[in-house]
Amino acid sequence: MTLEWDAGRLDSDLDDAGFDTLAVRAGQRRSPEGEHGEALFLTSSYVFRTAADAAARFAGEVPGNVYSRYTNPTVRTFEERIAALEGAEQAVATASGMSAILAIVMSLCSGGDHVLVSRSVFGSTISLFEKYLKRFGVEVDYVPLADLGAWQAAFKPTTKLLFVESPSNPLAELVDIAALAEIAHAHGALLAVDNCFCTPALQQPLKLGADIVMHSATKYIDGQGRGMGGVVAGRSEQMKEVVGFLRTAGPTLSPFNAWLFIKGLETLRIRMRAQSESALQLALWLEQQPQVERVYYAGLPSHPQHELAKRQQSAFGAVVSFEVKGGRDAAWKVIDATRVVSITTNLGDTKTTIAHPATTSHGRLTPQERANAGIRDSLIRLAVGLEELQDLKADLARGLAAL
């Protein structure tokens, strides 16, 4: 794109546009070719008119692309679209969900800072804090997600950041985000929320008072299990620090995967509504099965945080976890007897997946760490896709019949 190019009417006026319009159009800036779909810029570097032009761009004196580790037009479109959907001033794309968490901590915390993390987080998140971030002097403590009193009591003078998943993986536990944000801010700390299970289609943590929201875009944002990526969004003040970390350390998102995620966002709310509805019906059905001891899904009236979920989410998400009678052997039998759903640990796909968290996603944790997170050997996680509901029920019935 030349400096003289003005897209004019070719770009959409999105002032006061609604969520679904933003999901389809936000962030797109058309090139002189006038393409209707988002362009895919598969380039590592960019050319300059003169040496002086190159120097000015590298110095940040004039806007423009320098190198795709720094900026890329396709990645920029994805970032601006996520920022619009989350109500953020700025979003920064990363190579994966885990690199998004790494970027938050490495850019906003220093050695000697204290971070409070929910006990109810993804297994690799605990490993990141325990095995790596602690090496660099970051102090970490874990708090029961829903217990606001425990959060209040866990603060230290050096507490810089609170990190939570809400809903959590895989037990669909929640925290009152607005209340926790007030507690964090009263202590001068930031609240970061992993919004992966809800996406901005169902929940917008920044509007509830959180400072930072992040996603594994690999999950529902893509929606079809094709690419790896992550994203962090929030105020420009913090995001500029995240940009600086990515420019130097390099865990940036590839343009191709950004393009996949852009296309995934176009159908995000439609998918989330449909998958959430099927998940609710399956959760209600599972509660009635004699082989099932307990179902974890915030859409169930039996869930202890059902009313909170109704307040801060527009639907309950598509992940249903349940415990079967008989421990690990029984859980494996159920999983192995299914014939339609996919045995894999990914989630957010249009294809339903089934997994055994204690030996996969949380398998690297110690038995005590799993116990602290509520991950029992009898637990099965189901990430509901877009198949016919009756086909999913029949497949799960086939699995439960193996007990």
Image (cartoon, grey):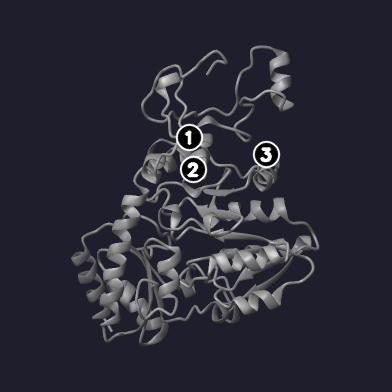
Q: How crowded is mark 1: few (under 14 residues within 10 Å), some or many (20 or more)?
A: many
Apparent side of residue 134 relative to residue 146 in the rendered image (left or right): right
Residue 203 in the image: above or below residue 361: above
Circles 1 and 3, Cβ within 8 Å, touching? The answer is no
* Foreground of the two, 10 or 391: 10
Mark 1 near mark 2, Cβ–Cβ under 8 Å? yes
Mark closest to the chain's N terminus, 1 or 2: 1
Identify the residue under disc 2.
Answer: 84
Instruction: Report the residue at 45% width, 64% height from top.
Output: 312
In the displayed structure image, the side of residue 394 where residue 157 appears, left or right:
right
Q: Which of marks 1 and 3 is nearer the N terminus?
A: 1
Q: What residue type is labelled 1?
A: Gly
Question: Which image quarter: residue 402?
Answer: bottom left
Asked where in the image residue 304 lies, by quadrant, the reply is: bottom left
Measured as percent of width and height from the top left, residue 403 is found at: 28, 84
Inter-mark Cα distance, 1 to 3: 21 Å
- Please state which of residues 19 and 130 is positioned toward the viewer in this rendering: 19
**Identity of the amino acid at label 2?**
Ala
Which quarter of the picture shows residue 101? bottom right
Judged by depth in the image, the label closer to the viewer, 1 or 3, is 1
- Residue 226 appears in the rendering: yes
For the residues marked 1 and 2, what is the alpha-carbon distance in whole angstroms? 8 Å
Which amino acid type is shown beneath numbered disc 3? Arg
Residue underneath mark 3 = 247
Whether residues under marks 3 and 2 lie with C-beta atoms below 8 angstroms apart, the answer is no
Separation of residues labelled 3 and 2 (CA atoms): 23 Å
Q: For the residue labelled by badge 3, is the local secondary structure a helix, a strand or a loop?
A: helix
Q: Name the disc covering residue 27, or none.
A: 1
Q: What element carries label 1?
A: loop
Any part of residue 341 in sight:
no
Residue visible at 22% across and 75% down? 398
Element at label 2:
helix
